[in-house]
Image (cartoon, rainbow, N blue to C red):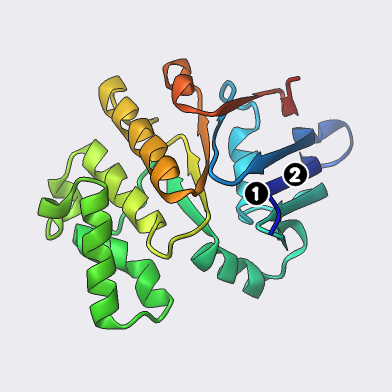
Amino acid sequence: MSDQLIEVKDLNRDYGTGDRAVHAVRDVSFTTGRGELVAVRGRSGAGKTTLLNMIGGLDRPTRGTVLVDGHDVSAAGEDELLGLRRTTIGFVFQSFGLIPILSAAENVSVPLRLAGRATADREERVSLLLELVGLGGQANQRPYELSGGQQQRVAVARALANDPPLLIADEPTGQLDSDTGRAIMDLLRALVDARGMTALVATHDASLMDRADRVLTLRDGRLEP
C-alpha cells in the first residue's frame, strides 16, 4: 500500500476550444499522504471546485492523471467511478445536499442502503456516526428542523457512512457563520486524527487554514509554489 492516498500529475481542465477556451485547471501536480488534512484555498474562480471534482471523479480532466488509493480515477469507467464513490471517496458540499423529506438518520443511512448493508448493521452504523458528529439526539429530525451547522454535520456523517479513506469537502463552511464554520473544521480535524482518513477541503476562509496540515493555493487554475 502506497503512503500516498492522492497522486495528481499534470492535471488540466479546459472548457471550450480555441481563443474562447477557459483553462480552469492548469498543470497541477501534488500528492497527499494518508491521514492528512489538506486545505485548498483560492479566490472564487481559481479552480478549487474543478480540481476537487476531478479528484472525486465527478469531472474528467482534459489532460493529466489522478490516482486515489491506487485507482486511476481519471481513466475509470462509470461503473468503477460509482464503486469508488460508494467505498473510497466521501463528499461534503457547501449546500449540504440532504434529502428534505428524510430524517437525519435516514439521510445518513442512504449510502449504506445503496451498499446493501443489512438493516441492523445500518442502524448501528447510523447511530454511531450521529454520535460521532454530536447529533445523537437529533436522529429523527428533518433538515428543516436543524440549524445550518447541524445539517452540515449530518452531511459529514453521511459522507463517512461507508468509512471511505478520502473525504472531499467543497467549501463546507461557505453557508455557515464564522463560529459554526470553525466548529465544522474542528470536526474534520478531529475525524482525520481519530480515524486516519485523508481530508481535502476547499475553502477561501483564511481563518480556517491553521486546522490544516498543509495548504495548497490555486491562482487562475495554477498551483502556487
Element carrying mark 1: helix
Left/right of residue 94 with respect to residue 137 in the rendered view = right
Coordinates of residue 220 in the picture (x, y in percent): 71, 23
At 31% from the left edge and 54% from the top edge, which residue is drawn? 98
Specify the amino acid type for callout 2. Val
Asked whether residue 133 appears in the rendered view, the answer is yes
Q: Is residue 22 above or below residue 96?
A: above
Coordinates of residue 113 in the picture (x, y in percent): 35, 76
At 26% from the left edge and 50% from the top edge, which residue is drawn? 132
Mark 1 vs mark 2, CA separation in Å? 8 Å
Question: Which residue is the site of mark 2?
Answer: 8
Marks 1,2: beta carbons within 8 A: yes
Placement of the C terminus among the 4 image quadrants: top right
Coordinates of residue 142 in the picture (x, y in percent): 16, 55
Q: Is residue 100 above or below residue 45?
A: below
At 33% from the left edge and 26% from the top edge, which residue is drawn? 182
Q: Is residue 76 above or below residue 12?
A: below
Question: Which residue is the site of mark 1?
Answer: 55
Instruction: Single out the residue that lies furthest toward the right.
Output: 18
Left/right of residue 125 with respect to residue 144 in the rendered view = right
At 25% from the left edge and 37% from the top edge, which residue is drawn? 149
Q: Earlier in the sequence, mark 1 or mark 2?
A: 2
Placement of the N terminus among the 4 image quadrants: bottom right
Q: Is residue 31 above or below residue 103?
A: above
Asked whether residue 15 appears in the rendered view, the answer is no
Specify the amino acid type for callout 1. Ile
Coordinates of residue 24 in the picture (x, y in percent): 72, 34
